[in-house]
Image (cartoon, rainbow, N blue to C red):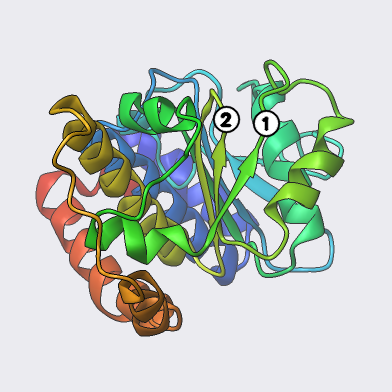
């Protein structure tokens, strides 16, 4: 504990207040992913771009389980994948390829979350993708892009196609792979992922009962939900859900702040 606190103080002294706040939020997102059972050992990635002109971003050390990650343990890298601050922790190349592509192309994509959950992977393997058959799916559906699977994402050339497929959307289903969301804050990216993952889970459960008897929503309802939910993510995430989620983590284990 004393060593961890000393390391946290050392890192905090080397970064701006804005970066430290971002580190705390991103570490919280890692802990929440673990809490909700969305992690995949050490093999998925959440990242956040550090304020400033350098386009540095933070990503997980490729040695830690998500429930272990703290604000000070996050690795800061540049657009070429080089570590900016000294740390022995390695960075996963596939994580760098996907996240650097989006951070570099989308100024509004401060946070990028990518998961390999069973439900997200199941929907990613369905030809129809996410079906707008539940309220949660309708909230997510209008903002989803799709990217075809090209193998494990270690090819830098794939970055151009990832960015092109994402376009101006804030969520993506990576075909035969998993889910991805972006946000102007970690909170916004997390709330989008929560809706997307809940929608995927509901779809898998719904289809497990068979397609016969599915109730198709009335015509025009999906469009109505789009208009109702399209502008509210920032307020819901930053003002309401995220502070509550941080309080939840603080009650369970506040060490993500170290």
**Distance of label 1 from label 2 (alpha carbons):** 5 Å
Question: Which residue sits at x=14%, y=56%?
Answer: 248
Q: Nearer the viewer, residue 65 or 113?
A: 113
Classify residue 240 as left or right of residue 164. Answer: left
Query: From this viewpoint, is residue 150 visible?
Result: yes
Classify residue 110 as left or right of residue 36. Answer: right
Image position, residue 238 (x, y; %): 36, 75
Q: Secondary structure at mark 2?
A: loop
Image position, residue 47 (x, y; %): 57, 46
Which residue bears the numbered disc 2? 175
Image position, residue 237 (x, y; %): 34, 72
Q: Nearer the viewer, residue 167 or 233?
A: 167
Image position, residue 211 (x, y; %): 22, 33
Question: Which residue sits at x=39%, y=21%?
Answer: 40
Residue 234 lies, with reference to residue 110, above or below; the image says below
Which quadrant holds residue 148? top right
Label 1 or label 2, whichever comes before in sequence order = 1
Q: How packed is label 2: few (under 14 Cα within 10 Å), some, or many (20 or more)?
A: many
Residue 72 lies, with reference to residue 185, above or below; the image says above
Which quadrant holds residue 245? bottom left
Residue 26 lies, with reference to residue 229, above or below; the image says above
Residue 148 is labelled as: 1
Label pair 1/2, CB-CB below 8 angstroms = yes
Q: Nearer the viewer, residue 20 or 201?
A: 201
Classify residue 109 as left or right of residue 140. Answer: right
């Amino acid at each position: 504990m004393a060593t961890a606190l000393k390391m946290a103080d050392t890192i905090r002294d080397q970064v701006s207040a804005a970066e430290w706040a971002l580190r705390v939020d991103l570490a919280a997102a890692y802990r929440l992913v673990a809490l909700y059972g969305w992690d995949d050992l050490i093999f998925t990635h959440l990242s956040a771009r550090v304020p400033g002109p350098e386009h540095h971003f933070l990503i997980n050390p490729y040695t830690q389980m998500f429930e272990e990650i703290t604000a000070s343990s996050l690795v800061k890298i540049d657009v070429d994948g080089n570590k900016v601050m000294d740390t022995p922790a390695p960075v996963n190349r596939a994580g760098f390829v996907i996240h650097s592509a989006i951070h570099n192309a989308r100024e509004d994509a401060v946070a990028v979350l990518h998961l390999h959950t069973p439900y997200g992977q199941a929907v990613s393997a369905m030809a129809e993708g996410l079906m707008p058959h539940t309220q949660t799916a309708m909230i997510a559906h209008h903002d989803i892009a799709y990217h075809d699977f090209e193998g494990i994402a270690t090819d830098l050339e794939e970055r151009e196609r990832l960015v092109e497929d994402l376009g101006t959307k804030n969520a993506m289903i990576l075909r035969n792979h998993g889910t991805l969301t972006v946000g102007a804050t970690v909170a916004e990216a997390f709330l989008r992922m929560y809706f997307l993952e809940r929608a995927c889970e509901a779809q898998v459960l719904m289809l497990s009962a068979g397609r016969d008897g599915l109730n198709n929503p009335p015509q025009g309802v999906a469009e109505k939900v789009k208009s109702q939910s399209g502008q509210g993510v920032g307020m819901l995430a930053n003002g309401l859900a995220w502070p509550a989620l941080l309080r939840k983590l603080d009650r369970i284990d506040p060490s993500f702040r170290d």
